[in-house]
Image (cartoon, rainbow, N blue to C red):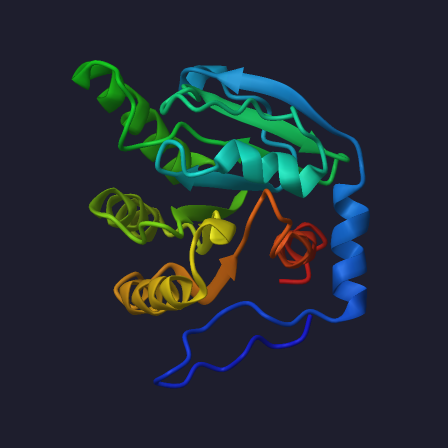
């Protein structure tokens, strides 16, 4: 993988360069079979911790399931919905016996009781804190809205549990270039407050395919032990 662009005062750090070998490694990994293997509503229901794991975190309706589908090249692997809060458990997907993708419950919009939302949040906190095979989290942020208080809350949680994470801006095709550039800059400033965050930002569109190859390459490097 080539080094990402070094940020200047006018240029936020954005993942922008991967060599052909890294991109091919990403393509090959995500061309493997990927199957839903487990859904956990409680920590005592978690599957065996036998492979490196990457967790997808984000506000409800940020596009977590769509991103999982885009990365794996499948339209219906992860269930998508226009109804916020549809994902209500930890969903595990086995990618070629090399990596597990974990689709986490969305936060911020779920139309459920306060008690049920807090129970989900507690499960997520304990999962992040205690899962020995969890190598990285992807914190998804909607390019149309930027970072919100709930995003900082999940980042604070990841900071406390020492889980390294990368911000992924989603739905980049829905934003004008100038607005996307502004969101990038604001996100970069926000990341400086979070010690467990990588400085690089992935910009993606599940619909148009923007940034998908680069994100695959990054995750392939993680699965192969190159990072």
- Quarter holding the C terminus is bottom right
Relative to residue 171, is residue 125 drawn left or right? left
x, y percent for residue 191: 32, 63
Q: Is residue 196 above or below residue 138?
A: below
Given the current orientation, which residue lies at the most extreme front position? 176
Q: Is residue 137 visible?
A: yes
Q: Is residue 80 above or below residue 178?
A: above
Q: Is residue 227 above or below residue 157?
A: below
Q: Quadrant of residue 164?
A: bottom left
Relative to residue 10, is residue 38 drawn left or right? right
Taking the spot 77% from the left edge, 46% from the top edge, the residue there is 29
Taking the spot 48% from the left edge, 39% from the top edge, the residue there is 56
- Quarter holding the N terminus is bottom right
Residue 23 versus residue 93: which sits nearer the camera?
23
Relative to residue 18, is residue 20 drawn left or right? right
x, y percent for residue 196: 37, 59
Taking the spot 48% from the left edge, 53% from the top edge, the residue there is 172
x, y percent for residue 36: 65, 22
Q: Quadrant of residue 211?
A: bottom right
């Amino acid at each position: 993988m080539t080094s990402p662009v070094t940020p200047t005062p006018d240029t936020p750090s954005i993942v922008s360069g991967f060599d052909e070998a890294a991109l091919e490694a990403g393509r090959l990994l995500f061309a493997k079979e990927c199957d839903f293997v487990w859904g956990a509503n409680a920590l005592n229901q978690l599957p065996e911790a036998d492979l490196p794991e990457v967790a997808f975190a984000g506000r409800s309706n940020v596009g977590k399931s769509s991103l999982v589908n885009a990365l794996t090249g499948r339209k219906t692997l992860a269930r998508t919905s226009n109804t916020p809060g549809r994902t209500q458990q930890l969903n595990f997907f086995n990618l070629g016996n090399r990596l597990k993708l974990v689709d986490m419950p969305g936060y911020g919009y779920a139309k459920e009781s306060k008690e049920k939302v807090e129970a989900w949040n507690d499960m997520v906190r304990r999962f992040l804190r205690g899962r020995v095979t969890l190598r990285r989290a992807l914190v998804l942020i909607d390019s149309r809205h930027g970072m919100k208080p709930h995003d900082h809350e999940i980042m604070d949680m990841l900071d406390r549990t020492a889980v390294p994470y990368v911000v992924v801006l989603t739905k980049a095709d829905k934003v004008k270039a100038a607005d996307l550039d502004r969101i990038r800059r604001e996100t970069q400033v926000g990341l400086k407050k979070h010690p467990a965050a990588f400085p690089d930002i992935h910009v993606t569109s599940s619909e148009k395919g923007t940034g998908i190859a680069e994100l695959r390459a990054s995750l392939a490097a993680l699965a192969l032990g190159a990072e």
